[in-house]
Image (cartoon, rainbow, N blue to C red):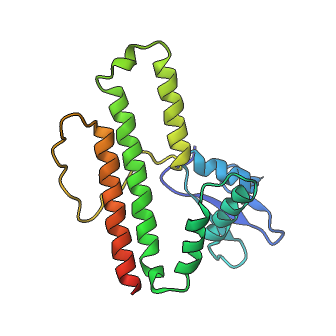
Amino acid sequence: MSDQGKPLLIKRYASRRLYNTETSDYVTLEDIASFIRAGRDVQIVDLKSGDDLTRQYLLQIIAEHESRGESVLPLEVLNDLVRSYTSQASTIVPQFLAMSFDMLRDGQSRMMENMGRANPMAAMPGFDAMRAQQEAFFKAMTGGRMGTSVPMPEAEEAEPRPAGKSGRDDDLEAMKRQLAEMQDRLSKMGK
């Protein structure tokens, strides 16, 4: 039985073949992507040198998906990432990206929770199946980590909801506001 708390250890042999130490078999990049989509962290190490190659292989998985037309990253984001490697922003970009993905996971998690609470659509035939499909989609989009977000620093208290606005609108507005604040901080640091 595997220990879900520890990353799945994958060893790269001199032949560049990747070996799953839990199942004692060889795996492909697509297998590794499947493990990650299922919520499992992986660690890929070179058998001979012991070097951690995880980042290199994860970037390769992303590049392969992007090259097949499964584009998730807009061209502007890719350009900004390249720029961040040659600017002072390289120190804040990882933190910014982590916070952005945490906000995305948290928002998706809250939306899924709200769908289950006192929802008149819950009585609709097939609603449970639709909800399960949405949960699977969100889990795939967030790497299986729905609801495991890290609290953001300087979190503000929730403002009272104006009449006529839904919780989803409030969440979206709060995310937009936080993103604008982070972009403002980034632009000030780059000057």
- Left/right of residue 59 with respect to residue 156 in the rendered view: right
Q: In front here: 151 or 23?
A: 151
Q: Which residue is drawn at 28% across and 22% down?
A: 118
Q: Residue 180: percent from the left, percent from the top?
A: 35, 64
Q: Residue 104: percent from the left, percent from the top?
A: 42, 51
Q: Residue furthest right?
A: 15
Number of numbered discs visible in the structure rendering: 0
Q: Which residue is drawn at 62% across and 73% down?
A: 52
Q: Which residue is drawn at 70% across and 55% down?
A: 65
Q: Which residue lies furthest to the front in this view?
A: 164
Q: Residue at x 39, y 35 (%)?
A: 112
Q: In front here: 93 or 45?
A: 93
Asked if one can make out residue 147 in the rendered structure from this viewpoint, the answer is no
| Position above or below: 113 against 105 | above
- Left/right of residue 79 with respect to residue 28 in the rendered view: left
Q: In which quarter of the image is residue 42?
A: bottom right
Q: Residue 44: percent from the left, percent from the top?
A: 64, 65
| Position above or below: 161 against 44 | above
- Left/right of residue 9 with respect to residue 147 in the rendered view: right
Q: Quadrant of residue 82?
A: bottom right
Which quarter of the figure is the C terminus placed in? Answer: bottom left
Which quarter of the figure is the N terminus placed in? Answer: top right
Q: Residue 130: percent from the left, percent from the top?
A: 51, 25
Asked if one can make out residue 124 in the rendered structure from this viewpoint, the answer is yes
Q: In front here: 35 or 81?
A: 81
- Left/right of residue 11 with respect to residue 188 in the rendered view: right
Q: In front here: 76 or 70?
A: 76
